[in-house]
Amino acid sequence: MRISSRAQRIEPFYVMEVAKAASALAAEVARSEAPMIFLNIGEPDFTAPPLVQEAACKAIHDGMTHYTQATGMLALRERISDWYLQRFNVQVPASRIVVTAGASAALQLACLALIETGDEILMPDPSYPCNRHFVSAADGTAVLIPTTADERFQLSADKVQSAWGDKTRGVLLASPSNPTGTSIHPDELRRIHSVVSHKGGITLVDEIYLGLSYDPQYGQTALSLDEDIISINSFSKYFNMTGWRLGWMVVPERIVPVIERLAQNLFICPSTISQYAALACFESDSIAEYERRRAEFKARRDYFIPALNALGLTVPVMPDGAFYAWADCTAACKKLGEKFGNDASVKDSWDLAFEIMKRAHVAVTPGRDFGVADTHNFIRFSTASSMPQLQSAIERLKALLS
């Protein structure tokens, strides 16, 4: 059976490949004194709050499980619109909001609607691997532009201007970013969008971690800049609904019919039960709980990043959002190579991730997924686990690297 060239272009999602190895080892050490600690997957340890769970159960009990509009229930789109006004003081009409089967579906819809075969989309290196694969699946080409710690691992307007070519269609940014947890300063984002607009291109911004922002100067939606910016968001991260597979996108009014037509054919509609549940996300009690959890995520960051730095796993830019630590592991690779000699070949973050998994029973993510420039020297930790788990992980890493 012939496999399409499109499918063959998509590389494995190495985050999940490492996760499979970690899960296999976890089963072996589950009853040991050091069961596996998972700091590799970007999934909150919190689940949906009580009101959200109750809303889902009520929808099932009441038989509210039929198809909705492809763009999502109007009531939910209006709730999201209200959230933008209350949270960010930005007016986003419900008519511009499309509810989707997760942020992944939103990105797929955006790429299919806007990218022609051969179009190039500029993205920072490092960045979330699936985003570039969405571009590839739409027969476009993701062009990764190396970034530095001084740039907060984000694109600049100057780099966008310099990299823009005849085939360039636009930019795909993430703020805050996975894997770095860093955001683009609003002033720089404004300059980037000005360059893109002048070129007649598209500015697509992944904002799925925006609710988990810890610094007011960065915690602003790109939608405040221009109605032509396309924003992708999700109920997975801030709203703790990962497996519910629900997200949304905000697009210019004129392309809503295009997105709707694609969504009708590809997805029919987002999960109806998840949509009814998501209505309860915006109740005052739920928001209060989400804010408590956001403070907990910040406390974890404030503990974990300095602890990593003390171990020589240097995080060059303090994350201002999300729940990741993007750590330079060059010194740690050298130290482990010297410590175990012929028993360990630790050339880069891929080798280091498996050594940490095997010797300390801590699962982490090597930088291999996130780009090509310098990512082999970086390793990503997720701080979405509980504080006791993070403390135990630091103690194990300390023992390993001493």
Image: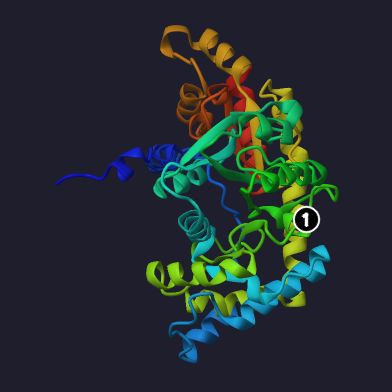
Q: Please state which of residues 356 and 286 is positioned toward the viewer in this rendering.
A: 286
Residue for badge 1: 225
- Give the residue displayed 71% in from the left and 74% down from the top: 93
Query: Horizontal and vertical percent for residue 169?
Result: 55, 45
As drawn, 172 above or below 46: above
* Left-right relation of 125 to 286: left
The crowd level at tag 1 (other Cα within 10 Å; few <14, some 14-19, many 20+) is some
Displayed quadrant of residue 230: bottom right
Pick the residue in front: 217 or 96. Answer: 96
Residue 14 lies in what quarter of the image? top left
Q: Position of residue 131 (x, y in %)?
A: 51, 46
Quadrant of the image occupied by residue 86: bottom right
Q: Is residue 243 left or right of residue 265?
A: right
Residue furthest toward the bottom? 62
Residue 173, percent from left and from top: 63, 44
Is 159 displayed left or right of 60 in the figure? right
Asked whether 352 or 95 is in front, the reply is 95
